[in-house]
Image (spheres, helix red, strand yellow):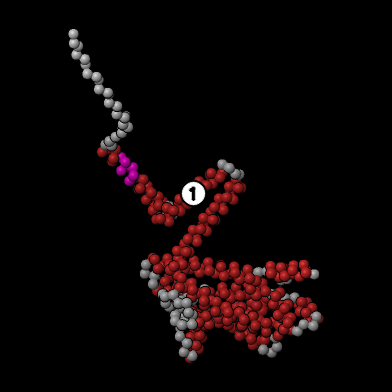
Amino acid sequence: MLTQESPPAAPSAPLPAAEPRVLLRRVSPEGVATLVGAAGGALGLVWVLYERVLPFSGVLGFWLCWYVAFLALYAAMAALQWDKREVRHRVTTVAFVTGGALTLVIVLGQVFYVLHAMIGTLEQIGLATLLSVPLGVAAALFLAEVGGALARPVRIIVEAMTALPDIIAGLFIYALFILTLGLHKSGLAASLALTVTMLPIITRASEVVLRLVPGTLREAAYALGSSQRRTVWNVVLPTARSGLTTAVVLGMARGIGETAPVLIVSGVTKELNYNPLQGPQVSLPLFIWNYAHIEAVTNNYVARGFGAGFVLVLMVLVLFAIARWLGGKAPGELSRRQRRRLARERARA
């Protein structure tokens, strides 16, 4: 008997892999309205906070609030590790470092707008210092060390120049060098005007400093057979070096921020001029005066004027720091090179 065999069962197909379930949540129109209303309320709260409640507004107020919040958060985290004194020290350090970095960024942002005025200021005050310091120190040496019948007229002239208005220096240079000799308006003319302004300040301050040098030092030098010229050069001037540097700093402080003398003789330009001997050359005080009074038609021009003032203050600080570093050593204090030379001489001996 034949039996019909059932066909072999087909191999079962592999089960499909389980697909990840995606949960879709639909937001009802009421939920969307709720979210939009919350966002609008938050924006409204921020607007009220920065425009009506706080004394400052706009982007500056926003970043200032975040900066204060950052300091508060840093203080809270520091309080978990250190005592109160260490927390105050660290928070103060962070505040000064971040504030200095922010100030540096602001200054660098303004440098591109006032670069031509910075070059003019540096060149003009450099030439004025180069001309006024030798003349002023020489006049002070004459008044303090030489004297004689001409000392009184020289002192009267110096005191009279100190009391003159600054614009007289500009008018003097304009009348003598521009109208009479035919010199054009330039950075050199501005430097001459600043020289007239700085000269009496340096002379009077240097004379006071030279008179403070003890007379026993001069007597000791004369007793050793030194002449007056060598005594002044090797004894008096090195002893009064720090005070003379202060006198130079005072003269630079008088000249670097002057606007009236350079307004008449330097000319106004918006171009970068590296040559102070030819063509108009603007300085930072003149740039500030021009943008704050003449071209103050928008807030951007006024902001540039204030930025130039801030750059001027920093330049003055840097120049004064350099001047004090050059002449800040006490009388008789040796420099590194002099100490190395003495050490080599002692080693040879």
Quick check: 231 above or below 292?
A: below
In front of the other: 269 or 39:
269
Q: Which residue lies furthest to the bottom in this view?
A: 180
Q: Where's residue 104, x and y in %?
A: 50, 61
Taking the image as drawn, is residue 162 in sight?
no
- Range of residues picked out in magenta: 34-40
Residue 39 falls within the magenta-colored stretch: yes
In front of the other: 238 or 57:
238
Q: Which quadrant is the C terminus positioned in? A: bottom right
Other residues around mark 1 within 10 Å, as few (<14) / some (14–19) / many (≥20): few
Q: Where's residue 35, x and y in %?
A: 32, 41
Q: Where's residue 67, x and y in %?
A: 47, 52
Q: Is mark 1 on a helix, strand or loop?
A: helix
In front of the other: 15 or 279:
15
Left or right, 232 with reference to 12 = right
- Residue at 49% x, 67% y is 311
Q: Residue furthest top?
A: 1
- Residue at 72% x, 76% y is 213
Taking the image as drawn, is residue 12 in sight?
yes
Q: Where's residue 203, x and y in %?
A: 63, 80
- Residue at 63% x, 73% y is 245
Left or right, 200 with reference to 290 = right
Q: Which amino acid does label 1 sit on?
A: Phe
Residue bearing the label numbered 1 = 70
- Residue at 69% x, 67% y is 336
Left or right, 36 with reference to 147 = left
Residue 291 sits in quarter: bottom left
